């Protein structure tokens, strides 16, 4: 009897005429492993993309639709010395990746604004103990406000949204005092600038956001990596079933690909991966 493997359940369309699959790979430890895998998979005819994520230890592969059996890719990785298995990305993990990218954009905006506002603040600090005119000081303050206010409105979204959700639920979290402090510091700075005061705090507010975003991004990135490792382990232990696809052919498929009416072979000693009715054979379960 012929035995095959069917990984079509993990294949998805990545565009017109292009198919995509994600694989979790064991044994990837360095840039040399990445280059070896990418070169080895790119050498397969009709493969259009082979990209290794060293952090998550995964491979993203794309090829021309209908030209490649995913099991061939897994065999090729085994030839290269790496054990691979299909991976189905969870929706929660996709959301975490998007959140991590958003935090990185916020951090970039805040850091850029901090550098520029600090550059404008140094002349003001020096001028307050020298001969800077009030008009010049106000000019630098307004320039700082022009940079800090829109930058804070964008970069502070992770904290403002969280604080708003907490207040809407009639509770508080750490983001509530952070948001209040940043908003009050900026508001007071605008008022002080309008009244030609010597001191404004645009630099302190945007710098606080930058440092907080560094911590928030590192925390998010660490949790994302932990989830990725857990997802790889779950994929390694994913159950499969031997499905009859013909009179003399059995295909090993993931349990999620078994549908009502399919006939499954349960060998002695195997775990029963699906619920069903015994139609032939005698044994104990």
Image (cartoon, rainbow, N blue to C red):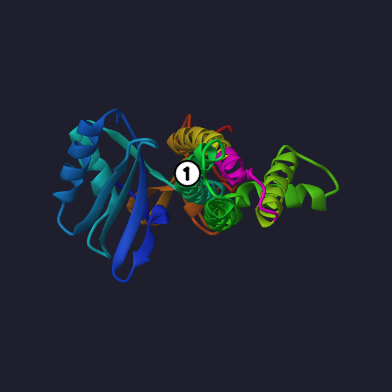
Q: Is residue 104 covered in magenta?
A: no
The residue shown at (33%, 36%) is 54
Which residue reaches farthest bottom?
A: 16
Label 1 SS: helix
The residue shown at (55%, 58%) is 146
> Which quarter of the figure is the C terminus placed in?
top right
Q: Is residue 203 covered in magenta?
A: yes
The residue carrying pointer 1 sits among few (fewer than 14), some (14 to 19) or many (20 or more) residues within 10 Å by Cα, namely many
Give the number of marks.
Answer: 1
Do we see residue 280 in this rendering?
A: no
Q: What stretch is highlighted in magenta?
A: 195-210
In the foreground, 111 or 22:
111
Residue 249 located left or right of residue 141? left
Residue 85 located left or right of residue 258? left
Residue 30 rendering spot, x and y as whole percentages? 26, 29
Residue 104 rendering spot, x and y as whole percentages? 47, 46
Residue 70 rendering spot, x and y as whole percentages? 29, 51
Instruction: Classify 101 as above or below 231.
Output: below
From the image, tell me which residue sits under label 1.
111
The residue shown at (48%, 29%) is 269
In the foreground, 128 or 24:
128
Do we see residue 124 in this rendering?
A: yes
Residue 187 located left or right of residue 256? right
Instruction: Classify 273 as above or below 14.
Output: above
The residue shown at (24%, 37%) is 34
């Amino acid at each position: 009897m012929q035995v095959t493997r069917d990984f079509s359940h993990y294949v998805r369309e990545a565009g017109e005429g292009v198919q995509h699959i994600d694989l979790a790979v064991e044994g990837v430890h360095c840039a040399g492993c990445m280059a070896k895998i990418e070169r080895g998979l790119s050498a397969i005819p009709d493969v259009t993309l082979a990209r290794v994520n060293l952090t998550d230890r995964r491979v993203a592969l794309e090829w021309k639709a209908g030209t490649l059996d995913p099991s061939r890719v897994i065999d090729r990785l085994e030839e290269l010395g790496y054990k691979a298995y299909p991976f189905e990305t969870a929706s929660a993990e996709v959301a975490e990746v998007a959140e991590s990218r958003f935090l990185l954009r916020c951090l970039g905006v805040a850091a850029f604004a901090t550098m520029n506002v600090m550059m404008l603040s140094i002349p003001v600090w020096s001028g307050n103990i020298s001969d800077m005119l009030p008009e010049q000081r106000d000019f630098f303050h307004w320039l700082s406000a022009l940079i800090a206010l829109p930058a804070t409105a964008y970069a502070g979204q992770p904290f403002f949204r969280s604080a708003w959700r907490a207040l809407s639920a009639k509770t508080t979290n750490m983001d509530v005092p952070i948001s209040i402090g940043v908003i009050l510091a900026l508001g007071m700075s605008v008022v002080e600038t309008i009244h030609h005061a010597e001191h404004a705090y645009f630099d302190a507010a945007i710098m606080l956001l930058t440092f907080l975003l560094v911590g928030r991004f590192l925390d998010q990135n660490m949790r994302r990596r932990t989830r990725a490792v857990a997802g790889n382990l779950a994929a390694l232990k994913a159950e499969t079933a031997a499905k009859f696809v013909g009179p003399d052919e059995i295909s090993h498929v993931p349990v999620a690909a078994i549908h009502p009416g399919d006939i499954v072979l349960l060998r002695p000693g195997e775990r029963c991966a699906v619920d069903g009715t015994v139609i032939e054979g005698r044994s104990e379960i």
